[in-house]
Amino acid sequence: MIRVVVADDQALIRGGLRAILLAEPDIDVVGEAADGEGAARLAGTEAADVVLMDIQMPGTDGIEGVRRVAAARPQAKVLILTMFDLDEYVFAALQAGASGFLLKTTPPDTLAAAIRACHVGELIFAPTVTRRLIDAYVHRPPAPAGIPPVLRVLTDRELDVFEAIALGLTNSEIAAKLYMGEATVKSHVTRILAKLGLRDRVHAVLLAYECGFIGR
């Protein structure tokens, strides 16, 4: 059972999300919060697996809430759910440690699937966000030739997987793209994170952007 905390300052929206998620046989809503501080507290006390977090909330907003969840319950994943599809929110949420960014217009079945994927470590983005991330980094001026020094600990195959992670592909999509089994992809991802000293896939994405690996 995936234990979920819902954080939104509007009680009506929290209630609607609770009703949607409780209809899923493998998801349990273990708490509701009106701001990021409350979400972090509940994530810790209720041993949450996933926190569904709004961004614009009075008091502690969603971006700070992501940081506080990481401190209170490091193993919990945070999935941002918002009405505001703005680049500054996307990047701030990623830098804070969020594992995905969806809009409140997301269909219920897609939301449930996203929570499941987030729970197992996948990165989740609304399609419009994914397109802009790719446009921002793949279509920018090329970086200097060669592999950035920080990535030279990776094998050629690991670099292929790392690039796919940075473009937001799931394990199953990477497996199809690179013609390998999904279990093999998972092993590569684990080794890549260990070699680079990264906590999760979000930090892998950020590193790929920061060192200029994407768009080289």
Image: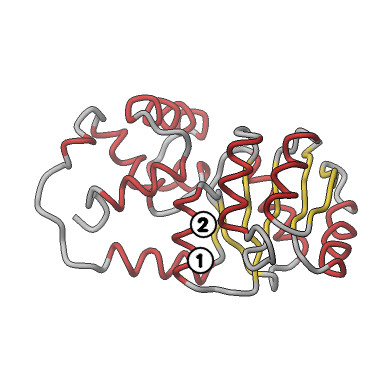
Residue 111 location (% of width, % of height): 71, 59
Q: Which mark is residue 89?
A: 1
Q: Are marks 2 and 1 in contact (CB under 8 Å)?
A: yes
Quick one: 68 or 83, which is closer to the camera? Answer: 68
Q: Is residue 149 left or right of residue 160?
A: left
Query: Which residue does the image show at 78% across and 59% down from the upper left?
Result: 34
Give the residue at mark 2: 93
Q: Where is 212 relative to 193, above or below? A: below
Q: Which mark is residue 127?
A: none
Q: Residue 193: name its quadrant.
A: top left
Query: Which residue does the image show at 66% across and 53% down from the upper left?
Result: 114
Query: Which residue does the image show at 62% across and 58% down from the upper left?
Result: 62
Residue 35 location (% of width, % of height): 72, 58
Q: Residue furthest left?
A: 145
Q: Residue 149: name its quadrant.
A: top left
Give the CA distance from mark 2 to mark 1. 6 Å
Disc 1 element: helix
Q: Is residue 50 left or right of residue 141?
A: right
Q: Residue 196: name its quadrant.
A: top left
Identify which amino acid the numbered label 2 is placed on. Ala
Q: Quadrant of the C terminus?
A: bottom left
Tally the marks.
2
Identify which amino acid the numbered label 1 is placed on. Tyr
Q: Is residue 122 left or right of residue 108?
A: left
